Image (cartoon, grey):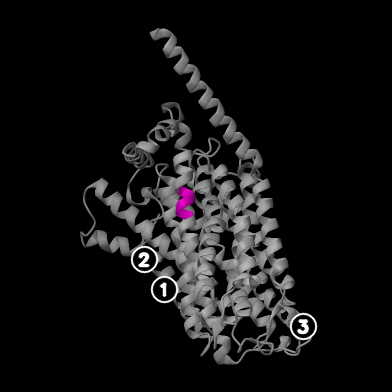
């Protein structure tokens, strides 16, 4: 495997550490930083559409109105940058705009299933760099429509479909690289911290898009497109996908992971349980064998977590794509301010991913961790809908939110909702996927992990495509209550698909407790 040009240059100049341990530590840090930047830029480039579609230049359907006036303004003729929307009612216009979201998301979901298998057969450095550079190019082209005066709906939908295809390269690629470099110790915490790139990318994307949306919405896409392409080129120069590429064997890397795991009291027993026997060495050496699609589906937990992610991601992505629009319409703040307020949900997502990882690490029960957060998310979403629906919603003064008690309460509830909605989503797509990739039928295969990750995230991405589409259709008349009922129902469905896994975790915990109790009784009887 050819070494990255930047790494080769460092070797020639003698800047790489000579000691194997120090060299591995340096490359681990570089992999952590590079993959973090990569997926931050992926999400950064996905966010602008949710901000731009609130701009009056992109869609204008008359003056602001309240929910009880929706029958009147439903017949209002809208104007839009997209000529096919001109003259449509607000409900029809929003359905058309929803096509921009769903065309991207369905394309992303469809190509995700093939992306994992392709990642198994390519150098991941080329795979990720090419996907990011081409994603940047087509994101740039979407924004170029503003300067080129392109008003065709077919153009925008085509760009979204092509961008979705190239962006599907991201998740299987970065998760596989992370799994190649980072072992089993503290996986939930490491992945939870690392997965904050999703929310950070959404926040930066909102802020960048919001900065240009009122003056030149084209730059809301051009700038993120340039960023993701630039980071992709940086990965091409410096990413090392596997320890073996710089002469570190799999056995050496695993041994160091075990040593590091032993320094953590909470992970000590888990490290001992997961250490392979000497008899497994031959199987471990066959790690480059790819697993089939049906073989991956037979791994216990893959189907349940995939279906749970379908509904979890449906909820998360509906917030991602429609929360700025919801805040804009309900509170009457301008597009830039609604973009800033929507980032509170993503800040909660960062906290949620880390919290879910810590709980999963300490308990060893990821399904129960997800279920607890899903249960708590339902009343939180209900409270948020009640507040913004009239209970104590944000008020505005010439498009700027008024900082009063209702504003503070709304921010707090938005933050907590972000924690509870994104926590399970983050845990399943990172630590759970990596854990399933270490199932005995895979023996830690990094190549097989790309397929497992693609199945789980691909299934979730189908839900992510359906959610915003349903939200667009349900909110077209100005009444958002049905959107929140849909989100709460999806949350309950996600919870139901984890029921069997939660029961199995409870049984293991109960049996372990019973065994410890019997051992304690035996110890007492011997001493007496």
Residue 407 lies, in percent from the top left, at 52, 73
Q: Residue at x 46, y 80 (%)?
A: 223
Say above or below: 514 vs 98: above
Q: Which of labels 3 and 1 is toward the front? A: 3
Task: Identify the residue position indicated by label 2 in the image.
Answer: 237
Q: Nearer the viewer, residue 420 or 42?
A: 420
Examine the rendering and report whether any part of residue 54 can be seen: yes
Residue 309 lies, in percent from the top left, at 61, 53
Residue 74: mark in rendering: 3
User: Which quadrant of the rendered structure holds the N terminus?
Assistant: bottom left
C-alpha gap between disc 2 and disc 1: 11 Å
Tell me whether the residue at label 3 lies in contact with that at label 2, contact meaning CB atoms closer than 8 angstroms: no
Give the prevailing secondary structure in the magenta stretch: helix
Residue 497 lies, in percent from the top left, at 67, 46
Residues rendered magenta in the picture: 353-357
Q: Residue at x 66, y 68 (%)?
A: 468
C-alpha gap between disc 3 and disc 1: 43 Å
Mark 1 or mark 3, which is nearer the start of the sequence? 3
Q: Nearer the viewer, residue 520 or 86?
A: 520
């Amino acid at each position: 495997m050819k070494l990255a040009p930047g790494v080769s240059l460092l070797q020639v100049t003698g800047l790489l550490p000579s000691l194997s341990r120090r060299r591995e530590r340096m490359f681990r840090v570089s992999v952590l930083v590079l993959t973090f930047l990569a997926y931050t830029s992926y999400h950064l480039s996905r966010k602008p559409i949710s901000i731009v579609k609130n701009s009056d230049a992109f869609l204008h359907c008359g003056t602001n109105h309240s929910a009880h006036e929706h029958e009147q303004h439903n017949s209002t003729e809208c104007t839009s940058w997209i000529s096919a929307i001109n003259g449509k009612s607000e409900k029809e216009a929003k359905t058309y705009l929803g096509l921009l979201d769903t065309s991207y998301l369905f394309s992303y979901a469809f190509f995700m299933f093939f992306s994992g298998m392709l990642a198994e057969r390519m150098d991941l450095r080329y795979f990720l760099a090419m996907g990011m550079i081409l994603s940047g190019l087509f994101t740039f082209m979407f924004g170029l429509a503003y300067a080129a005066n392109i008003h065709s709906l077919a153009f925008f939908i085509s760009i979204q479909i092509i961008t979705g295809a190239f962006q599907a390269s991201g998740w299987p690629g970065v998760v596989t690289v992370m799994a190649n470099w980072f072992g089993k110790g503290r996986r939930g915490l490491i992945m939870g911290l690392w997965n904050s790139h999703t929310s950070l990318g959404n926040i930066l994307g909102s802020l960048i898009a919001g900065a240009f949306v009122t003056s030149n919405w084209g730059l809301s896409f051009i700038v993120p497109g340039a960023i993701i392409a630039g980071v992709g080129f940086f990965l091409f120069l410096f990413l090392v996908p596997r320890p073996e590429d710089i002469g570190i064997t799999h056995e050496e890397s695993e041994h160091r992971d075990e040593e590091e795991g032993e320094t953590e009291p909470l992970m000590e027993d888990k490290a001992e349980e997961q250490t392979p026997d000497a008899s497994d060495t031959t199987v471990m050496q066959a790690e480059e064998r790819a697993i089939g699609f049906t073989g991956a589906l037979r791994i216990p937990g893959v189907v349940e977590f995939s279906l749970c992610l379908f509904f979890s991601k449906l909820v998360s992505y509906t917030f991602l794509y429609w929360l700025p629009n919801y805040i804009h319409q309900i509170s009457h703040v301008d597009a830039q301010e609604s973009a800033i307020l929507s980032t509170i949900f993503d800040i909660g997502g960062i906290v949620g991913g880390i919290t879910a990882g810590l709980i999963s690490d300490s308990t060893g029960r990821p399904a129960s961790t997800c279920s607890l957060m899903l249960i708590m998310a339902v009343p939180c979403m209900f409270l948020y809908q009640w507040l913004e629906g009239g209970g104590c919603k944000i008020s505005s003064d010439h498009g700027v939110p008024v900082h009063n008690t209702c504003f503070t309460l709304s921010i707090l509830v938005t933050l907590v909702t972000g924690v509870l909605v994104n926590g399970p989503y983050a845990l399943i797509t990172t630590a759970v996927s990596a854990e399933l990739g270490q199932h005995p039928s895979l023996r830690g295969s990094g190549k097989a992990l790309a397929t497992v990750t693609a199945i789980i995230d691909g299934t979730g991405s189908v839900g992510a495509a359906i959610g915003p589409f349903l939200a667009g259709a349900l909110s077209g008349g100005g009444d958002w209550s049905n959107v929140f009922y849909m989100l709460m129902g999806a949350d309950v469905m996600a919870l139901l698909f984890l029921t069997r896994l939660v029961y199995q975790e409870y049984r293991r915990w109960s049996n372990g407790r019973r065994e410890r109790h019997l051992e304690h009784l035996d110890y007492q009887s011997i001493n007496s």
